[in-house]
Image: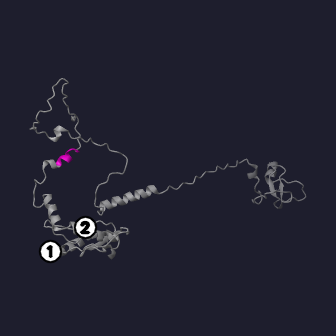
Amino acid sequence: MTIAVSAAGDTIPPFYLYPRKKMQSTYLYNATSNVVGFANGSGWMTSNDFIEFMKHFVKFAHASKEHMLCNAWTKNHIGLSLDITHVAEIVAISIQNSVNSRNIASGFQRTGIFPFNPEIFAEEDFLAAKGVNEVTLEGIETAVSYEQPAADEEVSSVGSSAVASTSHSTLDEVSPFRRVTPKKKSNRGRKPMQSAIITLPEHRKAAEDAAAKRRKSNTPLTKKRRTEKVKRSKPSSSSSEEDHDFCLNCTKLMPHKMTKNNSIKCNTCERAFHLQCVDMGNRSYFTCRNCDSDLDS
């Protein structure tokens, strides 16, 4: 809520700004007369909203004797929960009791703003703040010595007349103020933040980067599948299975199960051949061409 007052005690109707996407008429239920309301996503005063406030301000800040009176708040809210629709109604009664010419003018006068009075505050008004000032200098003596009377010192009679003291002692001399030592910075808790206009581009970008960093840190890491390489043993060149897996005549693979009906072996090198690829004739044995050439040579 934004409201403007002057040193003369004048005021204008309130300007409401709600943190909502869309303004509804129920937000100003039972509000004071001539109030205006707007809504945006954040609820902060932006440049566009301030222009609307200035239009509202110019409408009522004119040099005339007209004063808009606030309506009395006569509704009863017993048993109802407070929500955003009741804000304007509750503020209305507060404005009636506090925002008046007498209180506004007194506020400017008591603080010395108008009429201007630089001597409005005396030194004793700052004594409370003086006692809690942080002191970083070392060697400050805060102990006060007291002289104890001797045991044989005569005590004045009870009937002696009291004499008024004429000595003037300051509060600091009677009882020194307690000095506050600097506090150690703690690593616990939230990181201290500073006030800033979040609608500025640089603050907006910083907020987006921080949100992206949080999302990245909260993303669960996908476990990589562990792949194991299976080492396959390479067959040696001297393996009999590799040497005898195809026929030398037709260069086709030999059957997985070789019998006398589908294969025949050389009687010299014992290499298997397809039976249909070999011309047996009337012979009862078989010798391959490689072995025949070796025998001929």
Q: Quadrant of residue 32?
A: bottom left
Structure colour scheme: one colour
Do tag 1 and tag 2 residues touch (Cβ < 8 Å)? no
Secondary structure at badge 2 equals helix
Q: Is residue 88 left or right of residue 210?
A: left
> Which mark, by number, is residue 157?
none
At label 1, counting other C-alpha atoms closer than 10 Å, the crowd grade (few under 14, some 14-19, many 20 or more) is few
Q: Quadrant of the N terminus?
A: bottom left
Indicate the position of residue 239 as horizontal and vertical percent values.
74, 48
Check disc 2 and give the amino acid type: Ser
Q: Say whether residue 220 is magenta.
A: no
Q: Please state which of the two labelled residues, at mark 1 or mark 2, is closer to the viewer.
A: 2
For mark 2, what is the residue?
A: 94
CA gap, disc 1 to disc 2?
24 Å
Q: Say whether residue 129 is magenta.
A: yes
Residue nearest the observer in this picture, 145 or 63: 145
Q: Note whether residue 106 is visible.
A: yes
Q: Is residue 209 left or right of residue 181?
A: right
For mark 1, what is the residue?
A: 62
The span shown in magenta is 126-132
Secondary structure at badge 1 equals loop
Establish if 27 lies above or below 128.
Answer: below
Check disc 1 and give the amino acid type: His
Please identify the residue farthest to the front as the structure is shown.
Answer: 159
Indicate the position of residue 278 as horizontal and vertical percent values.
83, 59
Q: Quadrant of residue 134?
A: top left
Residue nearest the observer in this picture, 271 or 156: 156
Residue nearest the observer in this picture, 146 or 100: 146
Residue appearing at x 15%, y 47% in the figure: 124
